[in-house]
Each structure stands twice: as C-alpha cells, then as structure tokens.
Image (spheres, rainbow, N blue to C red):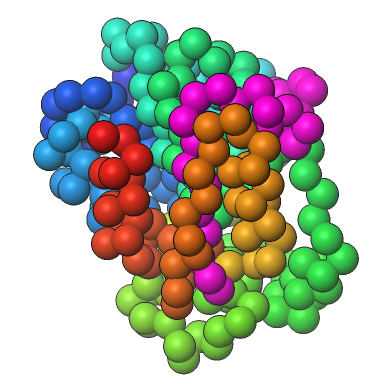
Amino acid sequence: MAKIEVNGAQLAYDEAGSGSPVVLVHAGIADRRMWRGQVSALAARHRVIVPDLRGYGDSELPPAPFAHHDDLVGLLDALGLDRAALVGCSFGGRVAVDTALAYPERISALALFGAPVSGNEWSEETERLWEELVGEVDPEDFAASAAGEVRFWVVGPTRTPGNVDPELIRFAEEMDRRALAAELALSAVEVGELDPPAINRLGELRMPVLAGAGADDLADIRRLADRIAAEAPHGVRMPDVPDAGHLLPLERPEPVNAALLDFLS
C-alpha cells in the first residue's frame, strides 16, 4: 500500500504492472480489497491502480468539502497520468460515470459492473425488497447493518445465504462494517454531486463503455446496465454472469477478467 496527497487528503492505493493505466474503483459497501481477483490478471498488460475512495479503507477524510469524481482526476494528476480507463463496481461505477462526464478528456474507457447512476431513482420493487430482506436496522449497529446490506446486495433477491460461498459473505460483511463507519463520517462532510446528474447524460459518454451485472443482482441494476449500454454511443452490454450478485468482480473474477482483458485490449 502507498499513500498520495490528492486535493488535500491522503488517499491509499495499491499499484501493480505496467502499460496503459487502469483505475479500479470499489463499491460503497467495500474498499479496494474487493479487486483482489483482478489485479494480477490486469497487471500483465496494464498499470493497475487501486485506490480507496476518500474516507474509505485506509484513505483519510479531512473535514473539508470535496467530490469523489474530482478526487479520481486528482489521483491521475498526482500520479502524472494524462488519461486512464476506469473500472467501477456499484457506487464505484457511479463515481466512474460522474468522472467521465465531468472530465471526458481524462477517461479513455469505462467498464461498469452493477453500477447505479447519479440521479437514478429506485423502483418500488427495489424499495419493497429492501423492506422484506433488511427492514429496520439500527444504523449505529454496524454488524447488523452490514449483515443486512450483504444479504440484500451480495446474496441478492433471488438467492438465499445458503446458496453463496460463506467466505464471500464473511469478507463482504467485514468490508461493509468498515464502509458503514466511513459513510457515517462522510455524512458530516460536504460531498459534492455531479450537476446535472448522469442519468439523462449517458449519451455524452463518448469513450468505449462496457456495462455488466450479475444475474442475481437487482432488476433495477440490470436494467441500468441495459440503459447505459444502449445510450452510450460506444456502449457494449456484457451478458449477465450466472450465479453472481452485486459484487460481481469479487464473486466471479474469471468472466470479469476475461471481459476486461478483451475490452481494454
């Protein structure tokens, strides 16, 4: 792990390989460790940079306003990179899309897995599923909250915990407990949003875009992948990966790595 100053904050990151740069952006329920299945595969051809977003993992959270999409470009600046491909999962995909819209000249390609989009509204179906699978949880009880979020996102609505690798559930809950503490701290800081948001601007994504999802992820997420691929001028929709939920790169690294190596070649 290394740290580098970006917009007044020390951001933690891992780095491996050489070649065209690729930045892997983690989910909101995780940290940079979720990309453990991608780094070595991509590093054979690329310079792979894996940061913790500000406030998450080992990155700092100074009490000053900021925006995650500004931080990603600040990271490129700090590393002396003119352009990079962004690979994002879940919230990291949302940040990647916002970054590509705010700084299109800096982003060479986008690969998005289970990505929501800023400005999107969840369907009543998703709201109902949250109530059924998670319900009311004390937000300060990180263990209970993490268990609920992992049940909702990682296991997903079409599987039961018994259908999922228990080590995946354990690791996801451990990451999410740290992420929940990060989100609590972030709630006290002014976090800037892309304005206007991305949901009606997908046609502005002029770089190559790959959108994918797990077959057991939320229907809303899979529909968003359809929409991103359809509206981005150079969008490609990766087929849904069977027996995979929201943390697709962590749960099913082989098909994700194969798709990324082909897409980024």
| In the foreground, 41 or 168 | 41
| In the foreground, 73 or 84 | 84
Determine the main secondary structure of the stretch shown in magenta: loop
> Where's the C terminus, which quadrant?
top left
What residue lies at 37% left-to-right and 72% top-to-bottom?
Answer: 168
What residue lies at 87% left-to-right and 65% top-to-bottom?
Answer: 124
Residue 140: quadrant of the picture: bottom right
Residue 108: quadrant of the picture: top left
- Tell whether position 215 is magenta: yes
| In the foreground, 76 or 117 | 117
- Tell whether position 207 is magenta: yes
Magenta-drawn segment: 192-216
* Left-right relation of 16 to 106: left
- In this rendering, the answer to whether 49 lies above or below 65 is below
Rendered location of residue 85, percent (x, y): 38, 28
Q: Is residue 170 in view? A: yes
* Left-right relation of 99 to 30: right
> Where's the N terminus, which quadrant?
top left
Q: Is residue 178 in view? A: no
Rendered location of residue 116, percent (x, y): 65, 47
